Amino acid sequence: MLVAKPPRIFVWLQHAHLFRFILPISVGLATLALFAQNAALRFKIAIGQSGSEIAAACGKQFEKSREDETSYNASIGVPLGLWSVYHLTPFENRMYVTMVHFDTANKLDPIMLMPAGNWTVAQILKDHPSLATICTGSCDLIQVPEKEGNTSLLLKPKSTNSSTRVLYFIGDTGSRFRSVTTTDSIVSWAYVLHLADFEKHHTGIATKTIGTWSP
């Protein structure tokens, strides 16, 4: 949904009695600014959308990226092959590098997001309501230890089946080791994955359930 920025309003005070208009105007502008900061993205990326639907919502892709067996993402459980990359901006300085993968039917399947800023798990779920719907029936919040020593956060639906998808949030894996332990933690990468693919790559890992979350 397109949300317009609030216009700049200039008030020229020619008479003293006009001061009584300042407060309502200021309150109105503040309310509009707060709405813009907290509104959902102008586009929705959802599992199952077609390539043409993504193009209509997001415009031209920025580039292609290929994931192979040697990539870090492959060790998490993403599908190998070509991914389409978009640089998507919702409001102000919030931007996500968004990578989407299409299955053999040209339907969007797993998703990878890289926030270009210090966005938390909670903010990402608010910005991407279609991701949050994975937890409509409530998700367990599960801490997952990584090989590098930090911790990542898995959101796994309480009710699962063969088509269940999960949300996975990780911190930096390079020189700045950072854990994602709660929904208030800052995220470096966010994933939508098939539960079966995730579990295949995390067999035998001692996880810890710390609570539940739902939209």
Image (spheres, grey):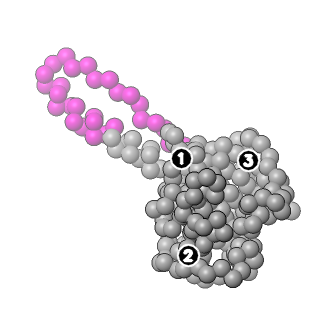
Q: Which mark is residue 85?
A: 3
Quadrant position of residue 157: bottom right
Residue at image mark 2:
142
Amino acid carrying mark 3 in the image:
Val
Question: What is the distance, in whole Å, between disc 3 and disc 1 at their CAs?
Answer: 18 Å
Q: Is residue 111 visible?
A: yes
Left/right placement of residue 111 relative to residue 36 reads right
User: Does the stretch in magenta take in 14?
Assistant: yes
Q: Position of residue 144 (x, y in %)?
A: 60, 73
Helix, strand or loop under label 2:
strand
Q: Earlier in the sequence, mark 2 or mark 3?
A: 3
Q: Residue at left 52%, top 61%?
A: 121
Q: Is residue 196 above or below residue 63?
A: below
Q: Residues within 10 Å of mark 2 (few under 14, many from 20)?
A: many
Residue 67 against residue 212 in the figure, above or below? above
Query: Element under label 3?
Result: strand
Q: How many marks?
A: 3
Which residues are the magenta region?
1-29
Mark 2 vs mark 3: give the one in front.
Answer: 2
Nearer to us in this view, 158 or 171: 171
Indicate the position of residue 102 as horizontal and vertical percent values: 79, 58
Amino acid type at circle 1 is: Gly
Q: Secondary structure at mark 1?
A: loop
